[in-house]
Amino acid sequence: MESGADILKKSTAKKTDRSAIAKSGAARSGAVRSGTVKTRKSSAASAPSERPGSWHLARTETERQLSDFEFGLERLAQAYYRWKAACLAAVCDVPLSGDDVAVLNVVRMGDEPKRLSEVGQLLNRVDVPNLQYATRKLTRAGLIETEGYSSRKETRYRATEAGRAVTEAYAAVRAATLPPMLEALEGWPIKSEATRLQLDVLASLYAQAAQIAITRRHQP
């Protein structure tokens, strides 16, 4: 018959064996988890990334071509508005931006008074506050004036005598500088007409795309 001391020793040995097994299992589980984390990290590291020099607006060939076109358009727009401001600065001491010059020339167009809405339509602009700022600036400079109407929407703008003199001088500088450069380009008349038609189409497409973007913004 086993003594009480022998039974106690066997019980202690069994507990030690179970503890060792539990520790071994925990170690294996930790190793598996560690391996999983390493695998995930390795997978993330091997995931394809955008090639150096790529751009978020040019991920496909069509997007790349569109981005190239838009960059050209941006450079053209900036050069065009700088040109208008420089051309006016050559004949007038009033500091005006290219946008201001555009409003002045449209108001003068045809020597007929125009409402602000008509100026916006001719320039394809919907930023009424900026148009109002431009007309106030031109009015303070004495280049345009208003015709009195009871309704603010019906107020018309027309060039003053000073405004007509400035726009005539502007036209003379413009005629003496840019047209000769354009006439030196081979096939300019035909190319300019084709470009104008394409720009009209693109303006319409951009307007449609803007409407789609606005619609998506309000979708849940």
Image (cartoon, rainbow, N blue to C red):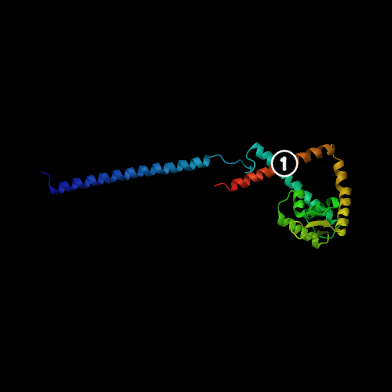
Labels in figure, total: 1
User: Is residue 105 rendered to the left or right of residue 209?
Assistant: right
Q: Residue furthest front?
A: 150
Q: Horizontal placement of 114 versus 8: left or right?
A: right
Q: Quadrant of residue 207?
A: top right
Residue drawn where x is 12% and y is 47% of the image:
3
Where residue 206 sits: x, y (%)?
69, 43
> Picture coordinates of residue 37 (x, y %)?
44, 43
Q: Nearer the viewer, residue 125 or 25?
A: 125
Residue position marked by numbered label 1 in the rendering: 202
Question: Residue 133 is drawn in which quadrant?
Answer: bottom right
Left or right of 73, for residue 48: left
Residue at 75% in and 49% down: 121
Q: Looking at the picture, how far across and down is residue 88, in whole percent?
A: 84, 55
Task: Name which residue type carries label 1.
Answer: Leu
Location of residue 153 in the rendering, given as x and y in whole percent from the top left corner: 74, 56
